Image (cartoon, grey):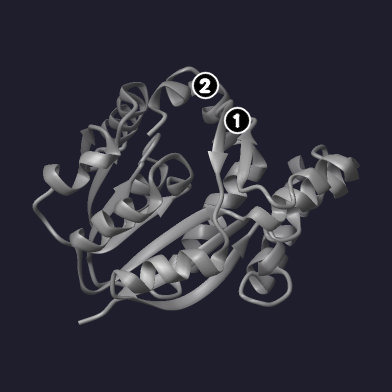
Amino acid sequence: MKSNAFSQTIQSYLNYTQMPWGKLFYQTAWHQIDLHKKEPTKATVLDIGSGFGITSLHYAHKGNQVTGLEPTREMVQIAENAAAESETSITFINAPLEEAGTLLSDHYDWIICHNILEYVEPRPFIKTIGSLQLQNGFLSLICHNPAAKLMKKAVIGKNPEDALTSLHSNKEFSSIIQTDITTYDYETLCIWLEEEDYVIVERFGIHNLYGYIADNDIKHDENWHRQMLALELEISSLSPYREVAIFTHILARKKQ
């Protein structure tokens, strides 16, 4: 895990989460999870790479028993402060993500792993996730979509030569974290999950159209944001929109 890169870009990453595009990311992801998360049933939730604790807090506020695992100490401090201010009980663990299998002895109803595979060795990490999942438990896995990488270079960047060069590469540069990341297509992710006895329940896209709108000024208009969120939620499970979304969101269930 490239924790040093996160330590050096704390403020830019935090700013992203507070911008309309960051808020829409979380709103969409939570909506998609909640379509399959039975309420008011309380669940054990493991948030891997919990960052600033935004998702951990969201599900702890709903009464779930949440554990957040995060390697970047500065992020854990921000998350712990937010939990304390809202008088919310969450267990945050500051440790390398790769140590999850040895640090954690519990098994979880829900495991949340959002934008983490890009920074770790994916196959052994998915194996670790599977070892922590309860039978019939759900995994929420979000990853950058490699198809969107090419689309953004051509459509937003207006650079067809750069887009063509990236066509056969799974490498991408994160402008927020300021480091190289590795992207994986949906088919590969499904193979890895199925090897660990997961059944794919649903495929969603996040920032399906939103990510291709270059006008950031309009995104600050609250009425426009509400309308765009409604559109994103409606099309997020539909083809061809989810295939070109900036992020791929897979919900998978662990077999009995």
Task: Give the x, y percent position of residue 84.
Answer: 26, 32
Tell me: 146 left or right of 211.
Answer: left
* Point 70% across, 77% down: residue: 239
In-front residue for pair 79/175: 175
In-front residue for pair 83/170: 170
Q: Report how far apart the C-alphas of labels 1 and 2 lie in the structure.
A: 7 Å
* Point 24% across, 72% down: residue: 41
Kind of residue at badge 2: Thr
Disc 1, SS: loop
Q: Which residue is mark 1?
A: 176
Kind of residue at badge 1: Ile
* Point 85% across, 44% down: residue: 156
Q: Is residue 37 visible in the rendered structure shown here? A: no
Q: Quadrant of residue 216?
A: top right
Tell me: 118 left or right of 151.
Answer: left
Furthest toward the bottom, the residue is: 256
Which quadrant, please, contains the N terminus? top left
Task: Give the x, y percent position of residue 85.
Answer: 31, 31
